[in-house]
Image (spheres, rainbow, N blue to C red):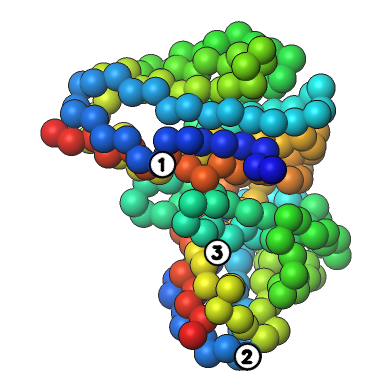
Amino acid sequence: AQKVTQAQTEISVVEKEDVTLDCVYETRDTTYYLFWYKQPPSGELVFLIRRNSFDEQNEISGRYSWNFQKSTSSFNFTITASQVVDSAVYFCALSEDYNFNKFYFGSGTKLNVKP
Amino acid sequence: NAGVTQTPKFQVLKTGQSMTLQCAQDMNHEYMSWYRQDPGMGLRLIHYSVGAGITDQGEVPNGYNVSRSTTEDFPLRLLSAAPSQTSVYFCASSLQGASNEKLFFGSGTQLSVL
């Protein structure tokens, strides 16, 4: 079974719309770490955020915000007032390893932001 | 700064051929890893290394070999390429341990096996 599920394969929005990317994870560990990465058209993945399982506080960084809910095993990512430059593939990932030696990635959500 | 450098960017192989995908980083990172990215499946870990001389298997290691003779380099070897190994390959590195959660990725190698 997949440890990280991103059910939305592709989302298209018009610039300035808000968009939420869903991420559901599965783990038996009580301590784990969740991540979001962005993959722009250039290809390389860029780190966005890490959340620890023992810290459910939501986080906001500019137009980005993350909603971590252990009760539903979800770690959703919202972009407010989307911009064309936000167009990319976004990956949610899980590590059960304190040293982050192994990551489990979701299948990614491709976000298209149209002008 | 070069960061994580992967070569080549594109490669076409015939079934049974061998080749090595190169990965080098100039950030003195202890941890390096290889992922493959397939449509609809995200990235899957092939092998990783936590330092020179130390390697371990990831989620999908079969058909791939690695070695880590230096901190900077972590090559991925395909001894006998198969069509199932057609994929985009990413190398990643980071400082070892929980103090650094950022994986730095290379720009990828697109491999086609005919």
| Residue found at x 53% / y 29% | A23
Give the residue type at disc 3: Tyr
**Same-subunit check for callouts 2 and 1:** no
Q: Is residue B54 left or right of residue B95?
A: right
Q: Chain of mark 2?
A: B
Query: Relative to residue B17, is residue A104 depicted above or below?
Result: above
Say which mark, if any, is on residue A9.
Answer: 1
Give the residue type at disc 2: Gly
Secondary element under disc 2, as helix, strand or loop, is loop
Give the residue type at disc 1: Thr
Residue located farthest toward the front when viewing the structure as drawn? A1
Can residue B98 be seen here?
no
Residue annotated with mark 2 = B16
Residue A83 spot, x, y in % from top left: 24, 29
Asked if disc 2 and disc 3 are in contact, CB closer than 8 Å, the reply is no
Residue B56 spot, x, y in % from top left: 82, 59
Residue annotated with mark 3 = B89
Residue located farthest toward the right when viewing the structure as drawn? B53
Name which of mark 2 and mark 3 comes first in the sequence.
2
Q: Nearer the viewer, mark 1 or mark 3?
A: 1
Mark 1 residue crowding within 10 angstroms, few (<14) / some (14–19) / many (20+): few
* CA distance for labels 1 and 3: 20 Å
